[in-house]
Image: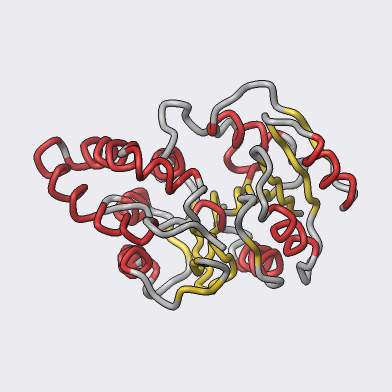
Amino acid sequence: MHTFVIPAYKESVYIENCIQSLLAQSVKSDIIVTTSTPSDFLDQMAEKYNLPCHINYNTGIANDWNFALSKATTPYVTIAHQDDIYEPAYTESILKAVNDNSTENPLILFTGYYDLVNGKTRPVSLNSLVKKTLLFPFAFKNSIGSQFAKKLLLSFGDPVCCPTVAFNLYSLKDFRFSPEYTCVLDWYAWFQLAKQEGRFCFINKKLVGHRIHSESETSAQIALGKRRSEEEQMFQMIWGHRLAKIISWIYSLGHVDNKIKADI
């Protein structure tokens, strides 16, 4: 019913921890590695854990993620980020929610998460508080189906943590991430999906450890100003030019949580 696909990039020192967390799930899933940066390191890692490894010859994060989704043969698939770890109950919780919403056509299901900084759980951050607030449409129910509610969820920022998302490929059909973005491609994708018939389902449990470190792509894009620029483009699409600058500036205050010293 469910597949984890790891779109591996170069030689992450954390990917083995990620793989081990996927193998430790209470309900087993298929596990696949994909990469556009093949290496002996990844070959050895895949061989060590007996995982299939597929090479993608089209570069770019959108292409990496689209390729990852294309390799899954199950109805539900999670793009497992190589630096993150997944709690043992992740798959079990996703499939339980699927059964609870079997007649409601879930497009995506996602869970709560916690930050890992320097190998330790960060109890609270400005960014996590903002995103928790943005999840208010789920205050009284675990899924939303109207276009208005789904767009409202995404109108003041992106509270959907991409590594936690399970995609319902049977409902999404021809869905693809847009190569126009490198930082907010997930937020843009959710906004496009919000226009489709189907539900967003939120599992209010912290089931993914999202690692923050100085070598991550998120940290690099924040340092370059790319993330702030793309976020402002999203707010312009939603709110127009004038309001976008104000909302974008407020939302970007959460970036300070990613400006940390090198992970140890």
Q: Residue 232: tell me if it is visible.
A: yes
Q: Quadrant of residue 182?
A: top left
The quadrant of the image that shows the N terminus is bottom right
Residue 234: horizontal and vertical position, in percent?
29, 39
Placement of 76 over or under 98, stated as above or below: above
Q: How many marks?
A: 0
Q: Residue 195: tell me if it is visible.
A: no
Most foreground residue, 199 or 158 = 158
Q: Quadrant of residue 257?
A: bottom left
Placement of 29 over or under 241, stated as above or below: below
Residue 76: horizontal and vertical position, in percent?
68, 50
**Residue at point 78% right, 71% down?**
26
Left or right of residue 190, residue 61 in this image:
right
**Residue at point 57% right, 63% down?**
264
**Residue at point 57% right, 52% down?**
105
Residue 77: horizontal and vertical position, in percent?
67, 49
Residue 230: horizontal and vertical position, in percent?
32, 37
**Residue at point 25% right, 35% down?**
237
Left or right of residue 48, residue 80 in this image:
left
Most foreground residue, 132 or 116 = 116
Residue farthest left in this picture: 242
Q: Quadrant of residue 130?
A: bottom left
Rendering colour mode: secondary structure
Residue farthest bottom in this picture: 123
Left or right of residue 24, residue 150 in this image:
left
Placement of 162 over or under 144, stated as above or below: above
Most foreground residue, 156 or 223 = 223
Left or right of residue 255, residue 57 in this image:
right
